[in-house]
Amino acid sequence: MTLPSPQHFFQQAMRLITPPPGGLPRQVDLRRAISNAYYGVLHATLAAAADQFVGATKRSTRQYALVYRSIDHGAIRRLCLEMKKRTLSRLLVPHAPPDGFGSNLKAYSQAVLELQEKRISADYDPLRRYRRSDALVAIIAGQVALTRFESATEAEREAFLALLVFKPR
């Protein structure tokens, strides 16, 4: 199975915001670029979760696809909102790393929330007008979010992904 590449989402977004000769990017292109910035981060997170729980060597299996597709926008939103709290909910605490979640994962979570809001607005708010700079900020935010996720400790990433895939009881 060929997974959607986060970098391809970002590259396509950059192409979409490139002004045509003698003009400005179209609103539909700016909106799609903002949406792509979010989807680049989302698909990287989905792949990380499926890699962790099924294995990167099993990307062509149904089990891999099951984990990949089991995470929805609401689940990632709820967990990222938890990451913003000073203290995690009591159900999540036992599953967090011993030292808690650090600044990289918290910054990643904040960026995911902001990108998700921007994506919803870009996709569904017909009154909103965008500038090229709005889309560029979203693209850069998506790239930085992935860097922050990758810079988190392995224990933090594993705990985050476990909480994303499995509901604590």
Image: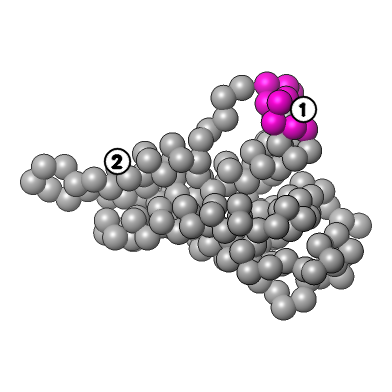
Q: Quadrant of the N terminus?
A: top right
Instruction: Point out residue 103 in the picture as x, y percentages from the top left corner.
Output: 63, 69
Q: Nearer the viewer, residue 150 or 114?
A: 150
> Do residues under tags 1 and 2 come within 8 Å of each other at their CB atoms?
no
What label does residue 15 carry, if any? 2
In the image, is residue 120 above or below residue 114?
Answer: above
**Mark 1 → mark 2, Cα distance in angstroms:** 34 Å
Type of amino acid under label 1? Gln
Instruction: Point out residue 98 in the picture as x, y percentages from the top left corner.
Output: 84, 66
Instruction: Point out residue 157 in the picture as x, y percentages from the top left corner.
Output: 71, 53
Residue shown at 61%/56% (left/top)? 151
Magenta highlight on residue 76 = no
Residue shown at 48%/54% (left/top)? 142
Q: Determine the secondary structure under disc 1.
A: helix
Residue shown at 72%/66% (left/top)? 101
Rendered image quadrant of residue 87: bottom right
Instruction: Point out residue 146 in the picture as x, y percentages from the top left corner.
Output: 54, 52
Q: Quadrant of the C terminus?
A: bottom right
In the image, is residue 136 above or below residue 20?
Answer: below
Give the residue at mark 1.
63
Type of amino acid under label 2? Arg
